Structure formats: structure tokens, C-alpha cells
Image (cartoon, helix red, strand yellow):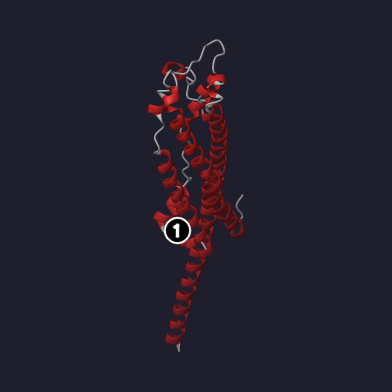
């Protein structure tokens, strides 16, 4: 009887120890999951601001390219030479590349801590970052389209163009170019008529590509999954 009682006590101690350890590990995992959820949410808030800045730049570019198409028409360009110079500079201003803040998700993947989250949340995380990578690839392909230096060189004077660029490097890319100095006499090169049509075709291509990324890629590939992931995090964790 004494042996049975001792065995029972040892058995219960092992079971209780096992249960306690499981509860402790579960508590630790829940705490870590909350910490990771908040960190991921903070990353997404940074992404929201980055997307707003990128959309602002692309919408600004679209308006400028539309105006460039107007002022470089055969009937308008000779009466809008300074404006044509100014607007042509938009073609060589690079986009601010969108790269998601992925420090937290990399930690989750490398440590195997994604298992702390529910399957729907894991799916949202995977969809968002896969979409961001896909967007970055398309954005990079669009950026590879070389500006028409050979075309611009037959229309605009290089020194006059250079005078429109800021010597500093402003944080806001829209401020890289400056309005023409009204005291300067901007002139088109004699060869501009031979190249103008091809130049305008290029400008139109740039505008269509820019508009396509604004209307399709950002809302569908980035903004929508971004919003859905943030909503899923809010539903499962007290993030803010």
C-alpha cells in the first residue's frame, strides 16, 4: 500500500509538473505573440505612411506628365518653352521605391514564431508580403525604362535644364526641380521638330505606366492586403 501511495504521489507530481510547464509555455507564447503582433502592426503603420507618400508622388507625376503632353504639342510648345523645360524634368525624377518594413516578419520566419499566430492571420501575413515583393518587381521593371536623354538632347539645352534642378537633395522629391527663372530666355534647339513626335510618344508611355501603377498595383497589390492584415491583427490582439 505504501508503495502504491508513493507511486501515486510521484505520478501526480509528474503530471502536475507537466501541466504547469505547459501552462507556463502557453503563457510565454501568448505574451510573445502579443509582442510580435504589436511590432508587426507598428511596421504596417510605417508602410501605410510610405504608401501615402508614394501615391502622392505618383499622382503629382501624373499631373505633370499630362501637362507636359499638352505644352509639347506642335501648336503649343513654342509659346510655352519655359514650362516645357520645367515639366520635362519630371521624366528624370526617380520614384521613391516602396519597400515594406519587414523586420518583424523576418524575425517571425527565422525563429519559427509564426506558429504563435492563427492560420487566417498567417495567411494574411503571407499574402501581404508576397504582394509587396510582386509589386517591387513590377515597379523595378517600370523604373528600368531609360529616360529619353537622346530625345531631350535634340529639344532642350542641357545647361538650361540643369539650372532647374535643386543643388541640394530635398526629402520631398517634388521639390527637386524648380520653376524657370523668368529673367532667363529659354529656347528650344533648332532640331526639336524632328524629335518632338517621338518624344511625346515616350511621355505618353510614361504617363500610362505611372497611371496604371496608381490605379491597379498600389490599391490591389499593397493597400488592400495591408488593410486586411491590420484588421486581422486588431481582431486577434489589442494592437494600436
Q: Furthest-top residue in view?
A: 183
Q: Position of residue 92 (x, y in %)?
A: 45, 29
Q: Within 10 angstroms of label 1, few (less than 14), some, or many (20 or more) residues?
A: some
The part of the image, by quadrant, that contains residue 233 is: bottom right
Q: How many marks?
A: 1
- Looking at the image, can residue 172 be seen? no
Determine the residue positioned at 55% across, 25% down: 75
Q: Position of residue 171 (x, y in %)?
A: 51, 29
- Looking at the image, can residue 183 be seen? yes
Q: Position of residue 85 (x, y in %)?
A: 50, 22
Of 85 and 193, nearer the camera is 193
Of 212 and 201, nearer the camera is 201
| Image quadrant occupied by the N terminus | bottom left
Residue to which mark 1 is pinned: 113
Q: Position of residue 228 (x, y in %)?
A: 58, 55
Helix, strand or loop for disc 1: helix
Amino acid at each position: 500500500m505504501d508503495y502504491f501511495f508513493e507511486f501515486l504521489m510521484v505520478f501526480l507530481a509528474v503530471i502536475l509538473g507537466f501541466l504547469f510547464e505547459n501552462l507556463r509555455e502557453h503563457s510565454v507564447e501568448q505574451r510573445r505573440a502579443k509582442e510580435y503582433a504589436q511590432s508587426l502592426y507598428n511596421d504596417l503603420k510605417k508602410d501605410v505612411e510610405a504608401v501615402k507618400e508614394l501615391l502622392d508622388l505618383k499622382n503629382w507625376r501624373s499631373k505633370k506628365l499630362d501637362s507636359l503632353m499638352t505644352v509639347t504639342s506642335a501648336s503649343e510648345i513654342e509659346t510655352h518653352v519655359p514650362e516645357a523645360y520645367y515639366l520635362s524634368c519630371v521624366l528624370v525624377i526617380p520614384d521613391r521605391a516602396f519597400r515594406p518594413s519587414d523586420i518583424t516578419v523576418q524575425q517571425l520566419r527565422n525563429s519559427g514564431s509564426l506558429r504563435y499566430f492563427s492560420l487566417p492571420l498567417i495567411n494574411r501575413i503571407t499574402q501581404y508580403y508576397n504582394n509587396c515583393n510582386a509589386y517591387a518587381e513590377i515597379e523595378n521593371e517600370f523604373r528600368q525604362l531609360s529616360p529619353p536623354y537622346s530625345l531631350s538632347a535634340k529639344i532642350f539645352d542641357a545647361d538650361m535644364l540643369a539650372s532647374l534642378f535643386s543643388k541640394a537633395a530635398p526629402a520631398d522629391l517634388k521639390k527637386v526641380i524648380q520653376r524657370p527663372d523668368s529673367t532667363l530666355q529659354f529656347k528650344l534647339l533648332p532640331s526639336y521638330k524632328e524629335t518632338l513626335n517621338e518624344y511625346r510618344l515616350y511621355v505618353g508611355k510614361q504617363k500610362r505606366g505611372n497611371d496604371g501603377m496608381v490605379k491597379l498595383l498600389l490599391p490591389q497589390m499593397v493597400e488592400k492586403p495591408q488593410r486586411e492584415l491590420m484588421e486581422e491583427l486588431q481582431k486577434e490582439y489589442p494592437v494600436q
